[in-house]
Image (cartoon, rainbow, N blue to C red):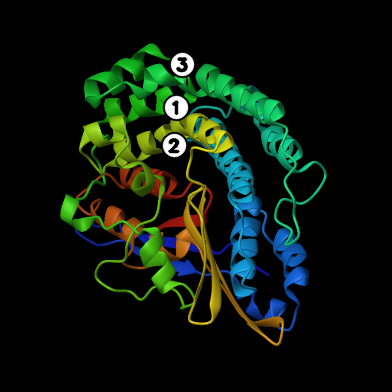
Amino acid sequence: MNFEGRVEIALPMEKGAAASVRYAPPVNVSPLLKGKRPQEVMPVISTIYGICANAQAHAAVLSLEAALGRKTDRDMAAARALVTSMETLRENVLRIALDWPRMIGGEPDGASVRAAMDYVPRMRAALFGEADPFALDAQTRPDAAAVRMVIADAEALLAGTIFGEPLDIWLKRRGYVGLLAWAVGSQTPAADLIGHLAEQGWVETAGMDGGDVGFLDVAMLAAHAGGDRPAAANDVPETTLFSRRAQAGLVASLNSSGLGARFVARLAELACLPGEMRLLLEGNGDPNTLSRTAGGAGIGIVEAARGLLVHTARLADGRVDDYRIVSPTDWNFDKRGVAARCLATLEGHEDAEEKVRLAHLVVNAIDPCVAYEVRAC
């Protein structure tokens, strides 16, 4: 069974021909969960999802709690959000170290970020001990000192391996001058990719006019929750790290939606996360999740590593009657979603090899974890 979905991109080599995006969605989980009690759902969700497993479990428990009419207190909401945020940090660190070098003909550097594999287990242990953070009866037992240590270790890894400078310095950079000064002056896989885009003249490639970019927000997603995949309308909204960080200082200063800005948005996500996690720990941050009831169903929405993720649970007589998941991929790789719109900008490229390379960059800039195939035709 395919629980993650797969994207197939047909890329015509003739000039002026449009690429097509076909998304094969994951298997519908509702038949697997129908008739189960809420407490029986969580082990199934935790078992079947390998990508963003904590985010999937987080959205699931929020939807079930809403369906049961339960309220999550602020401390629990923050503790769960800390776990999911650290998962987002880890996933993006790994993708940068392993995938970004390959995209420019280099070798992956997993050894330099191996420590990141321990961050989520350490965060879970610091906040919940040996208990499951996403169990319906979970209780948080925070060790604030241990949480601060995990965040500090993650920040040190980011500064040394991803950015090559302190995060607060990178966050103050503005415009292409500041970005390229960093790319030239740092020797990291992230800086190398940005430098490569600049050398090839691809920083603005795949960009769209501002009017063509619609961003999905929590309110829109809550309104859509419970439905099928988004309809192929003229303007299927986007939910990516670019949409999440479009207003971040360096990203906003580029005034672009091209490849450069999209990869920089992933870096902005990483640079911002340690500070945001500290605010959550101190009680000053926003967990940025949603648990609510609408139309008789419980809805759980979280910020996952690839965009907004929603689970919707409908109960009848205390058991699951219907269960739906809408992932970021459902939106971003709809046939008229952001991926298709970005790929459409490549129609004028005459060099077939370059066109294929750019298509791979587009997909990775939008979603570095999706299973996909680019087929030249």
- Residue 237 spot, x, y in % from top left: 32, 62
Residue plotted at (34% across, 49% down): 243
**The one of 264 and 123 positioned closer to us in this rendering:** 123
Tell me which label, 3 or 2, sits earlier in the chain. 3
Q: Which image quarter is the N terminus in?
A: bottom right
Residue 371 sits above or below residue 1 on the image: above
**Residue designated by label 3:** 166
Identity of the residue furthest to the bottom in this view: 317
Name the image quarter holding residue 150.
top right
Please report contact status of discs 3 and 2: CB closer than 8 Å, yes or no: no
Q: For the residues carrying marks 1 and 3, which lies nearer the camera in this image? A: 3
Name the quadrant of the C terminus.
Answer: bottom left
Q: Which residue bears the numbered disc 1?
A: 190
Kindly check if marks 2 and 1 are in contact, taking CB atoms under 8 A apart as contact.
no
Q: Mark 1 touching mark 3, by CB under 8 A? A: no
Camera-nearest residue between 361 and 84: 84
* C-alpha distance separating marks 1 and 3: 14 Å
* Circle nearer the N terminus (1, 3): 3
Disc 2 and disc 1: Cα gap in Å?
13 Å
- Please say whether residue 252 is visible from this viewpoint: yes
Residue neighbourhood size for the residue with mark 2, other residues' Cα within 10 Å, grouped as few (<14), some (14–19), many (≥20): some
Nearer the observer, disc 2 or disc 1? 2
What residue sits 42% from the left and 14% below the top? Answer: 186
Amino acid at the residue labelled 1: Ala
Residue 226: image x %, image y %? 49, 76
Q: In which quarter of the image is residue 353?
A: top left
Residue in the picture at 55% in, 78% down: 297
Left/right of residue 304 with respect to residue 32 in the rendered view: left
SS state under label 1:
helix
Q: What element carries label 2?
A: helix
Residue highlighted by disc 2: 269
